[in-house]
Image (spheres, rainbow, N blue to C red):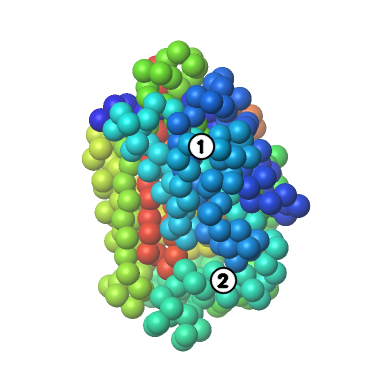
């Protein structure tokens, strides 16, 4: 395969938008194209992550419309759906097409407009990411799944639930601290542990500030062959490894505190990159709930199983930690427009490796990883990036 590089990135502010999903993607895409210093007509294909456009806005077949909006009405344009991992699998597919040599320059990303649905309809629609035969009819929700994970984690590793709740709260505090330095974040504000523990109960033991928000937003990345990147930028970011895995219903999974699809996906990415978890400086991972960040750091190999919550306590995932986790603010503070999330994670890693993140810049970062989870632990995609020459 050819070496692939990210040469341009763009992203809207996350939050509540009056723009349509297509309009938001066009904004992010044009920014990425400008950042890449290429012409629109140089792009050969478009890969778009989107989950609920047909439910949110009555807009299916979104990718061709997005292509047309940015002035490319005739190129191949494909929509990807993998629940919350949709943007990530669109990015992975784009990378593979360039690596294969079939395309030289492509654009990938994602977009979602969640705020139009309202809480009750959004809850119903998000439930479509669960098993519609065995999970959703029994009343399971995404907060419910991660509440189960928190209880199981507490029991399995003999961590008293009150202590685990404090450790989870520290995840939220850390990510909001990062988010307060991100002008594109949905919630660019700091919080305290007391704010988390005093917030509304959502699904015991998860409280409101343990949960990420529904957001609107879009992100886009221009990928080229590494050889072409040399002619476009002096700060290319190489793709050095990627992986993807899947699980069935949670009723088919042996231990939901250990997401086997993530283990498989991450091992595949590390093997392709020729590195180990110890080589990762920064990671944008899927913290849809605070406990989700803790179990992800274990499955990705950053900490032994059962030690992820203690690592947060020790500051090992903070600004000066062993691995800096979610310097963008993560889903928790940056926001979670589901189809765009995986692409937004890549946006942050690319900006970090180029040294362009201002107050939240991680000093000396050369290798970064994205981790995106979709549905009830059913789709996981991991991509590893490295600072170019």
Circle 1 crowding by C-alpha within 10 Å: few under 14, some 14–19, many from 20: few
Residue 295 screen position, x and y as percent: 40, 59
Circle on res. 30: none
Question: Relative to 178, is 314 on the left or the right?
Answer: left
Q: CA distance from mark 2 to mark 1?
A: 32 Å
Is 130 located above or below residue 192 in the figure? below
Q: Does the rendering let one see residue 201?
A: yes
Which residue is found at the position 37% from the left and 30% from the top? 103
Residue 352, position as x, y percentages in the image: 52, 31
Q: Secondary structure at mark 1?
A: loop
Q: In which quadrant of the rendered view does residue 379 lie?
A: bottom left
- Image quadrant where residue 249 sits: bottom left
For mark 2, what is the residue? 125
For the residues bearing labels 2 and 1, Cβ distance under 8 angstroms? no
Q: Going 43% across and 58% down the picture, which residue do you hit?
A: 82
Near-viewer residue (323 or 247): 247
């Amino acid at each position: 395969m050819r070496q692939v590089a990210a040469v341009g990135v763009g992203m809207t502010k996350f939050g509540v938008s009056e723009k349509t999903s297509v309009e938001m993607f066009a904004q992010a895409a044009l920014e990425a194209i400008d950042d890449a210093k290429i012409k629109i007509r140089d792009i050969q294909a478009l890969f778009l992550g989107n989950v609920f456009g047909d439910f949110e806005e009555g807009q299916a077949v979104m990718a061709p419309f997005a292509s047309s909006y940015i002035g490319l009405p005739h190129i191949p344009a494909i929509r990807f759906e993998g629940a919350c991992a949709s943007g990530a699998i669109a990015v992975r597919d784009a990378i593979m097409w360039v690596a294969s040599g079939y395309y030289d320059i492509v654009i990938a990303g994602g977009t979602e407009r969640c705020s139009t649905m309202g809480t009750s309809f959004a809850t119903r629609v998000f439930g479509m990411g669960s098993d519609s035969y065995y999970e959703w009819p029994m009343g399971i929700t995404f907060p419910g799944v991660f509440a189960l994970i928190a209880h199981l984690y507490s029991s399995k590793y003999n961590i008293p639930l009150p202590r685990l709740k404090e450790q989870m709260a520290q995840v939220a505090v850390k990510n909001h601290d990062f988010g307060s330095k991100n002008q594109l974040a949905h919630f660019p504000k700091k919080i305290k542990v007391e704010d988390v523990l005093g917030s509304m109960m959502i699904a015991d033991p998860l409280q409101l500030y343990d949960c990420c928000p529904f957001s609107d937003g879009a992100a886009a990345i221009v990928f080229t062959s590494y050889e072409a990147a040399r002619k476009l930028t002096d700060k290319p970011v190489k793709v050095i490894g990627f992986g993807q895995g899947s699980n069935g219903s949670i009723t088919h999974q042996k231990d939901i505190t250990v997401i086997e699809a993530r283990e498989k996906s991450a091992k595949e990415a590390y093997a392709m990159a020729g590195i180990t978890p110890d080589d990762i400086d920064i990671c944008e991972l899927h913290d849809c709930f605070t406990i989700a960040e803790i179990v992800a750091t274990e499955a990705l190999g950053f900490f032994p199983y059962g030690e992820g919550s203690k690592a947060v306590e020790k500051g090992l995932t903070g600004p000066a930690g062993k691995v800096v986790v979610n310097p963008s603010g993560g889903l928790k503070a940056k926001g979670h427009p589901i189809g765009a999330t995986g692409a937004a994670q890549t946006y942050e890693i690319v900006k970090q490796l180029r040294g362009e993140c201002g107050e939240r810049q991680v000093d000396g970062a050369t290798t970064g990883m994205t981790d995106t989870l979709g549905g009830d632990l059913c789709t996981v995609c991991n991509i590893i990036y490295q600072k170019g020459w």
